[in-house]
Image (cartoon, rainbow, N blue to C red):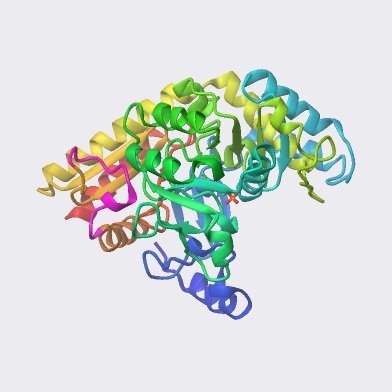
Amino acid sequence: MSGFKESEALFERSKKVAPGGVHSPVRAFRGVGGVPRFIKSAEGSRLYDVDGNSYVDFCMSWGPLLFGHQDPEIADAVKGALSRGWSYGTTEPYSLELAEYITGQLPWIEKIRFVNSGTEAVMAALRVARGATGRSKIVKFDGCYHGHVDSMLVRAGSGLAEMASPDSAGVSKNVAGETLVVPLDDLPALETMFQAHGKDIAAVIVEPIPANNGLLLPKDGFLEEMCAIAKKHGALVIFDEVITGFRVAFGGMAERTGLRPDLFTYGKVIGGGFPVGAYGGRRDLMDLVAPSGPVYQAGTLSANPVAMTAGIAMLKKLKRENPYARLEKHCDELCRKLEKASAAAGVKDIKFQNYASLFWGVLGSAKSADGFVRAQTQIPENQKERYAKGFHSLLSQGYYLAPSGFEVSFMSTAHTEQDLDGLVSAFVKGLQ
Ligand SMILES: *Cc1c(COP(=O)(O)O)cnc(C)c1O
């Protein structure tokens, strides 16, 4: 490691021209303290910073890079796309190819609309749900993140049936009041919410594997029951598969659970690392979207041909290589090794929760009966402080994890056995 003087200098400059010096909050390292590293390039499993350090990257741009940085197949496709121009502002065959491919592979996506981010996808899906049902309220779960849509920036109020209060300045009480928040892992609370507000609830939105406040593993049957309760009350169900789509399986959690909610949102993997989001689902619902229906939604750069081409290359490679079982096995092995190493070092209260190629360290005892963290309120007391220490120990040894104890880590096919064993060794050193 050759220090981080250059990163520090750039961060100081950046703070003068951007809020907090960043363009997305977690990047500022507020969750772990210290100076964010300025990355000048990346390849395979590695990030390279401006001071000449390299890091094995377990953040992977927060999920999109399932094949690692600069995957050659995606790079070739993108270079080809660039040579044809990079924005036409009109109809083109590339989004058609991606739309036909997705609707062909995932039968529950009967129609799809491309946007530029996961946030946009959620915003539009909520609008469709309201347009379809004529109802105004949305149920979300405490601890699920659905992008920075105004109405989704809320946490649970203290009482069960209480209206949510905004989690961010600038979100009006009226907007926040349209959102009803229910604890995860609590079906009776969901039923009670529907008893109280059923006729006004347009949709329930859920991250089928909540992965934005740690990795909150739902109990078997939770998603099935949740869908059933919503249906009984005439509300739609939206699976926000922005993280899980094309990551936990090609068909995401819809494939893994067999559940068929009404609408889906995608992002992250679907663009291969370029800015893409999408929403889709039942044909009758999607036909409500402009210009075929009354629900307005548009985008100057939507279905950008370069991003669409990256997405096509990404998804076709995923389909062909089918890396899911292998990734899941490696991720599980890594987590068990990390747990074993903790136990061997006499640290008894570190556990790793993992699902497919996502993993998250639980640093302390889960505040739950079965020892698993399934809701935000079950996250151990000192998670933040302990993670910050571990993060900096690993960073100084050349391993980059998400700079927050409440974010998951992402495994990619670019991670070698050496990368994974190296992480375990670095972790052991950190424990000492
Ligand atoms: C990342 C994420 C979003 C927001 O996507 P952006 O592209 O960051 O706007 C929404 N929902 C879930 C589940 C996500 O993980």
Picture quadrant where residue 97 is located: top right
Residue at 80% across, 29% down: 96
**Vertical position of residue 406 compared to residue 235: above or below:** below
Q: Where is the N terminus found, in terms of image quarters?
A: bottom left
- Residue 106 in percent (x, y) is at 62, 21
**For residue 328, side relative to residue 270 (left or right):** left
The range drawn in magenta is: 369-382
Q: Position of residue 114 (x, y in %)?
A: 72, 39
Residue drawn at (83%, 46%) of the image = 86
Pick the residue in front: 287 or 350: 287
Please, is residue 195 above or below residue 164 in the view? above
Q: Residue furthest left?
A: 346
The C terminus lies in quadrant: bottom left
The residue positioned 39% from the left and 64% from the top of the image is: 31
151 and 189: which is toward the camera: 189
Residue 28, placed above or below residue 408? below
Q: Quadrant of residue 315?
A: top right
Measured along the vertical axis of the image, is residue 425 above or below residue 235? below
